[in-house]
Amino acid sequence: MNENYDTYMKRFKPVKHFRIPTILLDKMPNEEKPADKLKAIGTLPRELRNLHTFYNPIANKEKKEELRLKKGKWREAVRKEFHDMNSREVWDVIDRFEMPRDRRCVKSKWVLKIKRNGTYCARLVACGYSQIPGVDFNDIPYSPVINDVTYQIVLVLSLIQGYTKVIVDVKTAFLHGELEDDEEIYIECPEGMENKTGKVLRLKKTIYGLVQAAKAFYKKLSQVLKDIGFEGGLIDPCLLTRKGEQGVVYIAIYVDDCLCCGEMQEIESAIKDLK
């Protein structure tokens, strides 16, 4: 402590002693008068007077433990994302020299987010701004959504008929979309991937961030719904209906979210068929 004190005294000029008013000293017992201590503290620089606020072993230990837990949760979220992509066979790992010379890799990055329920979510996305029109995608990309008027009609009809309304959120929705036969996309290996030196990823399905991801998912979803008995509307293709023994069920598509209206038995049957 003496060495630290001498070091700081060389760097900072001593300040004047802090003096306690005489009235307060007279009211204090002799054994509680901190005159000697106050003289020593008064000569210390301001940075050393509150040295305990700069280093708190207990607080630092708690902070390190909190950071360690957060790192573990983020790693688990990244592993889950890799597992989802590998289970759906989203890409093929190839050598960089196998990529055509007239093509270039689309950039990729990780998007990390803590949801409202406290879940740690990691998403590997492609940087769509680095895609080249006419090379990485041909058609004009769009994100199909149900028309506002159609959506309002479905809600009014469900209120009149007393239908049950259920919102269905498709997990990792865009990973289900399939690329066209003439579309060939390569992306850089993301951070955290093992043995990525000299390797690139050739996509077999769409991922989040691609320009054509929403359109490809809509094509896949509408085709699956039609295979299980749904019929698309002539005016609004994002509204599909199916009649069953218990009644009718409507599905309104809004990008990767679906609103199901109808009898509860038919809704459960439609969700079961989708799985």
Image: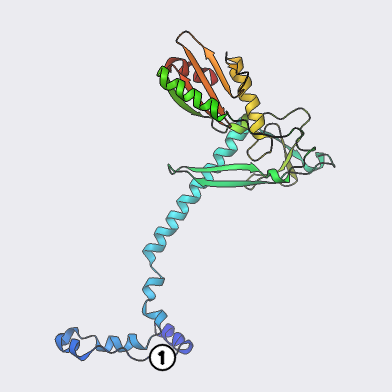
Left or right of residue 50, residue 75 in this image: right
Question: Residue drawn 55% across and 47% down?
Answer: 112
Above or below — where is 123 with respect to 172? below
User: Which one is nearer the viewer's eye here, 91 or 179?
Assistant: 179
Question: Residue drawn 68% across and 31% down?
Answer: 205
- Residue pushed farthest top? 245
Above or below — where is 29 with respect to 106? below
The quarter of the rendered structure image containing the N terminus is: bottom left
Examine the rendering and report whether any part of residue 200 can be seen. yes
User: Which one is nearer the viewer's eye here, 210 or 139?
Assistant: 139
Residue 15 x %, y %: 39, 90
Q: Residues within 10 Å of mark 1 (few under 14, many from 20)?
A: some
Q: Picture quarter containing residue 228?
A: top right
User: Which one is nearer the viewer's eye here, 222 or 184?
Assistant: 222
Question: Residue drawn 47% across and 50% down?
Answer: 70
Examine the rendering and report whether any part of residue 177 can be seen. no
Left or right of residue 202, residue 271 in this image: left
Q: Regarding mark 1 in the picture, which secondary structure is present there? A: loop
- Residue pushed farthest right? 101
Residue 132 x %, y %: 77, 42
Q: Which amino acid does label 1 sit on?
A: Pro
Residue 81 x %, y %: 57, 38
Q: Picture quarter containing residue 204?
A: top right
Q: How is the image coloured?
A: rainbow
The residue that mark 1 highlights is 14
